[in-house]
Amino acid sequence: MINWNGPLTSELTELVRNSGFPIKNSKTKITEFIYNRLIENGYSSDEVNFETIINVIEELSVYYSEHNKTNKTPSILRSFLKENELDVILNFSIKDKERKHGYLLDIPSGSNYIFSKHSYQNENPKQYFLQHLLALIITELNSVISKYAYHTEGNSVINKESKCSVNFKQWMSSIEKNSFIRMYTLNYDRIFKILLEDINIKCFEGYHATNSIDDMKGLRADVPKILNDFECNIQYNLHGSAFWKVKPLDKGGLPNPEILFSGIPELSVNDDQVSIQMEKGKPIYITNIITGYQKAQKGSLTPFKQMQSAFDKDTCNAKKIYIIGYSFGDEHINESIRTALRYNKELYLEIVDPSFIKNKLDEKLNITLFQSVENDIFYPTQISENKFSYFNDKVILHTLTFEEYLNQKCSS
């Protein structure tokens, strides 16, 4: 998304490090405290990004949760581990000093927090505080996405006429003449769908969005279409979207969350919070985007689960998959590609990544992903200056940026 003014991972990491609440008796943010503690314990700066920090908060939320809310028995982890210096992070107090149904938190401790939400599911206060912190961070991330990807019928910040946009539309138009366009993104925006519809190519995103004010009420995902219709153009956001929202409670007021499309950036701090236990005693805080390291667990919710199922089917039936800007860091995505390579003998991969060889991703993937390719010739054959072949053209690599790749596609 860099060519559409999307942020770098390093910029999102800097944003998160400066977001949220301070630790006790200090101006240092909890997120910055976590970052520094990881560095002090041997993590390199390359290993710690915004998702790493969010994951620590999510794991602490599980740590401070209760295995049995009725008896208030601690989580299994907390039964064996000492808290050490973690208490400095827990900069909150309970309003009226009493943990009761519907209690509120003061954040920082003793200070009124305007976004504090009532606890109606008997959450452990420490767990609940960390969920408030996550809500604030997710709100910041959604706001950043909105700055470059906001789009409604009457107001759009997407530059549809930039060189990259024009080249992308031209490339997609050439593909659409011969096959359906099945796009899966791990980004939190819907720019590519908007660009397709700008050239009258209908594109389904899991929801029947109108880009009008009516969408703000919340649209339910068309799950049957996601699961059954493979003869249409799509963009599915496997890790969610800044323009989805969480409906935390069902009609009966029970915590049965549903993820809806709203078309506007989701400000999680404004909404009631909800967590569900995907595994006994391990609450997962539900948000409109999946980040951190709990992706596999959160991916079992609708519509993430159904979109992942469609991805599995598409990869196993495709003749060519374009992989652009993906660092192969999500194992549930890698597993789908690995399975496709194992069972789909007609499949070819085309990878676009300027740092693929420099970062030795080819060597890593040869051990973890390409073992399913029935060909012993692993070492690359250079076809041209920035084009390489692996496994007798089974995998083609372009060491180009997406912008350079689009220029090359359209000029040829």
Image (cartoon, grey):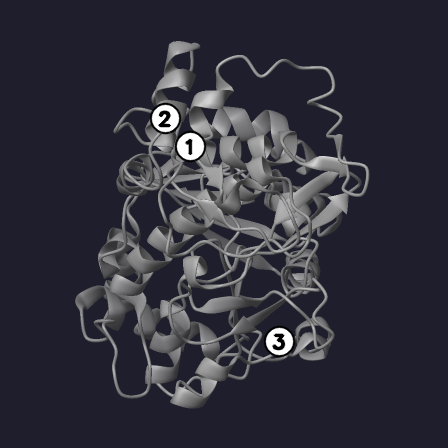
What is the quadrant of residue 8 in the picture?
A: top left
| Residue 379 visible, this angle | no
In the picture shown, does residue 320 fall above or below 396?
below
Residue occupied by mark 2 = 24
Using the image as rendered, state which of residue 373 and residue 15 is in the foreground. 15
Which quadrant of the view contains residue 270? bottom left
Q: Say which quarter of the image contains residue 26.
A: top left
Q: Which one is nearer the viewer's eye here, 114 or 12?
A: 114
For label 3, the crowd category at 10 Å Cα-Cα, with few meaning under 14, some 14 to 19 and many 20 or more, is some
Q: Secondary structure at mark 3?
A: loop
Q: Amino acid at mark 3?
A: Ala
Query: Which residue in the structure is indicated by mark 1?
Result: 91
**CA distance separating discs 2 and 1:** 5 Å
Q: Which mark is residue 136?
A: none
For label 1, the SS is loop
What quarter of the picture does the N terminus occupy? bottom left
Q: Which residue is mark 3?
A: 221
Q: Residue at x 68, y 22 (%)?
A: 78
- Looking at the picture, which amino acid does disc 1 mark? Asn
Q: Amino acid at mark 2?
A: Lys
- Whichever of labels 2 and 3 marks the residue nearer the N terminus, that label is 2
Mark 1 or mark 2, which is nearer the start of the sequence? Answer: 2
* Quadrant assignment for the C terminus: bottom left
Spot occupied by residue 218 in the image (x, y as percentages of width and height): 52, 79
Residue density around tag 1, few if under 14, some if 14–19, many if 20 or more, within 10 Å? many
Classify mark 2: helix, strand or loop. loop
Horizontal side of residue 197 vs 309, given as left or right: left
Decide: is 192 above or below 66.
below
